[in-house]
Structures are given as structure tokens and as C-alpha cells.
Image (tube, rainbow, N blue to C red):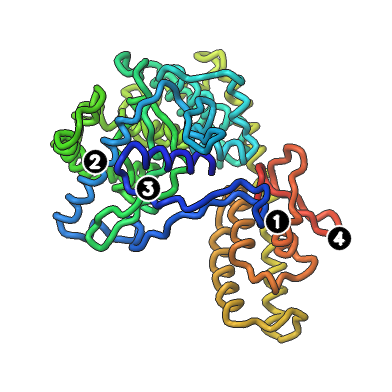
Amino acid sequence: MLSEIATMKYVAQHTTILLPKIHGYGFGGDYPTGLPFVILEFVEDTRLVDAKYHDHDAPPRVTLYRQLADIFVQLRRLEFKHVGALTLDEHGEPTFAPHRSLGVDFNDGQLDEQDPASLLGPHDVFTSTRAYVRFLVQMAFHNFLRQRDVVGTEKNAQVQLYALHRMRDYLRTWVEARYDRVPFVLQHGDLLPPNLIVDEHLHIRAIIDWEWSHTVPLQLVVPPFCLTGTALEQILRRDRLPAITQRWSKLAEQVRPVEANGSRGALPSLSQLWRDFDGCAGSEAVVNRTLVAHSLMSVSHLTEVYRNRLFSQEDDRHARYQRFFDPEHNAAAVDHALLVASKVQQRERVRATTAEVKDLLREDYRKWGAKLKRGRSPMPAMDADDTRRLTDFMHAFDQIMGSITIGLVARKLVTLLVAVYPPRLAQPGSVASALVAGECRRIGRAGVFGLPTTPRLEVVMAGGSLAC
């Protein structure tokens, strides 16, 4: 939250990008709740994700592209000397911190006890693109090794491990020398359709959720996925790239006119960075570079880009893959096999524990619902609000239980119970009651759900500081 407030202040001071006004904030202390908070202006209208913008006629879409181009042009002009993020100084003014946020993946890794921060020294500062890319690749390997539910089958584990190694090789030559030691620029970090507020004519009214903003190398300043409404891995799997690159082209076409109407910015300008998309969908090599840049901003997608894009373009791909796991051709093949076996075993243990906890939760919920139907529950009668919240809870609960990622189940379940579960209806001794009451804790580095071990019903969550 500290970085989000600082970034919103800085952007408001140095650009004309529309943001909600900050009416107040605090970090606990003497405030009534004792918790951090920020009070933002309420912005009318709707999120871009709900606006069905692809159904609009051409003129509103052109207006949207022009406004997005203006946003990216202005952000391009905000230059810094290091990778990092903004924070607040002792006077509440924004200042740059080279050791702060490195994006969503970095934060998620900390919450899931993968601890990517352990890869950084106390004084490490990234002043070159190559050094930063090396760190991101190292973080991808680190997360693969530490995450307990990252693979499915043995084949899946092999493919992911191979893809990580191949992406590391690919990225050794990916950074262009002209972009290695140039200024770093501020990016939103999560500029997706839910974070753009638009009116009925697709005029942007506000950009929200700046908490993942940080500075990036110019080579990572690429056309966004906010025009797709689809995650990167889904685009790759559905072969939707031709349509996406056409939208990138339309956005790039608007950059040069926007730059011409403003003051001369730093070089290389955004139109120069995006010139390969201006008026065309981009060559295969250009699209590859863009997809790799997106995967570096979310390193969990590195293997997806290689498997679904780069692998198919290699002439000797199948032979190379076989040699990677063949001890006669690769001295590290035995280590690779042991690592794959270890990841599969971890996944099976997680799967078994997850299934057991899901059964406990379902049984708890089934008994509760049965008592309600028979009218034998000691709980107070439900009013209209309770009924609505319970219906929302039932729907979301079923969705969450379909997840295969244990950390995701843990975080979403706690958030759901706190936000939706009718608090007056929590049964003493139930799993839901334990969670709502905040009776969850972490035990060592277990990284998986634990089972109830005492009458108090302790529920152990996977990784991180979960706000119960």
C-alpha cells in the first residue's frame, strides 16, 4: 500500500493520467482500526473488462487506443536510474527505493514461502537490463524448486524443467546492447481490463490498482495485454495471437500522433520502441520478443512462452529434448531425473493433503446445510442479508474447491470466508468457524494444509501472512 500511494502521488504530480484522488491514508498506529488504510475517490462508470469494448463501433475503440497510447507515452517519460519502486519519505512525499517491489510474482513467491528475496543481497541494485533479466531467470528456477504444487505429471515436470533451461539459453542473447544501460521507466505492473475505468463511450475515467508499479528496462516496455481480456497462457494455447497483434498494431499507430502533440520526450521514444508494430502486426521475431518480455514481467509464464511458442520454431527440437534427459549426451541428466522425481512426489503429497482438507470442508458445510434445512440448527434465524451472503458463499466455495493449486485455495478460501461468510452463522468447532475467527497459523515450512489436531481445530495454511 505504501508503494501504491507513493506511485499515485508521483504520477499525479508528473503526468495528466487520470487517477482516483487520495482523500486520506494511515498505517495503523493511533487510528481506530489499528490497520493500514487508504481512502480513495469513488469513480463512476464501469471497468473495461465489463464494457464489452470489442462490441463497440470503430470510433470509440480508436478513442480508447489513443488514450492508452497517451498513458504509455507519459509513463515512458518517467525515468529512473535503477529497477525498483516508489515509496514515501518521512514527509509523506514520493521517493524512489531501488530495493522495493519487483512485481506480482516476487510478492506471491514471498507469500507462498518460496522466498525469492533470499536471492538478493541487502545492497543489490539493478542498473543494467542483463543483470535484471539474469535475476528474473534465477527467480523462475528458484520458484520451480521451492513450489510444491508446480507440476502435474512426470511428463509435465520434465517439460517445465527443460523449458526453463532453454529459456535461460534464449535470454542470454535476448537483451539488446543498446538497451542494456539506459534509464529504467515506470510501469503500472498490472494494467489489465479490470483496472481501467471507462464510461459508455470508452473514455478512460481512471486507472486503479497501482500497488505493483515498478521501474523496468526499456526492452520490457511492450504493448500491453489490457486490450485482450485474456491471460498470456490462454492466448498462446488458443492461437489468438494474430488478433492480439492486430490490436497492438492499432495501439502503436496512435503513439506517434500523441508524441507529436506533446513536448519532446526522452529518446528512444515510445514510437521508436514500438515501431515494429506501427502499421503492421509485427514479424515473428518481433512477436517473440514481445511475448518474452511479457513472460519476464510474470516469470511463471516463462515456460508457457517457450513450450507454446519458441519450441515449435526450433528445427531440432525433439532431438534436443531427448538429449537433455539422456545421460550419454548430458552429464546433468541424472540430476534432472532426480529433480523431476522429487517434484512429482511433492505434488502427490500436496494432492493427497489437499483432497483430505477439501473433504473436511465439504463435510462441515454439508452438515451445516442439513441442520439449516431441518430447522435443528442452534444458529440464529437468517435475515435477507444472511441469505444473500450464504448464497454467494456457496457459489464461490464450489469454484474455489475446483482449484488444484493449494496456495491459491488457501488464500482465496480465507478471503472468501472473511468477506462473504455470514459471521453470525459460524458454528463453533467448524473449519469455517476456525478460519473466520482467525484461528489459523503457519507451522514451520510445511507449505501445505495441516489437519485438525486439537479440539480448537487448528487449520494450517500454505505460506505467507494470511489475513484471517
Quadrant for the C terminus in the image: bottom right
Dot placed on the residue nearer the N-terminal end, 3 or 2? 2
| Residue 379 image-quadrant placement | bottom right
Secondary structure under the numbered disc 2 in the rendered image: helix
Residue drawn at (20%, 28%) of the image: 264
> Residue at the location (59% across, 60% down)?
416
Residue sitting nearer the eye, 99 or 463: 99
Residue sitting nearer the eye, 248 or 197: 197
Q: Which residue is mark 2?
A: 69
Above or below — where is 66 with respect to 327?
A: below
Q: What is the CA distance from the residue labelled 4 to the residue labelled 2?
A: 59 Å
> How many marks do you count on the picture?
4
Residue found at the very far front of the displayed protein: 91
| Circle 3 or circle 2, nearest the eye | 2
- Residue 454: image location, x then y, percent: 86, 56
**In the displayed structure image, the side of residue 194 where residue 438 appears, left or right:** right
Q: Amino acid at mark 4?
A: Pro
Q: Are marks 3 and 2 in contact (CB under 8 Å)?
A: no
Give the percent coordinates (x, y) of residue 69: 24, 41
At a point 48% along the width and 25% down the height, the residue shown is: 137
Q: CA distance from mark 3 to mark 2?
A: 15 Å
Check residue 455 in the rendering and tell me which mark sits there, or answer none: 4
First-in-chain label (4 vs 2): 2
Badge 3 amino acid: Leu
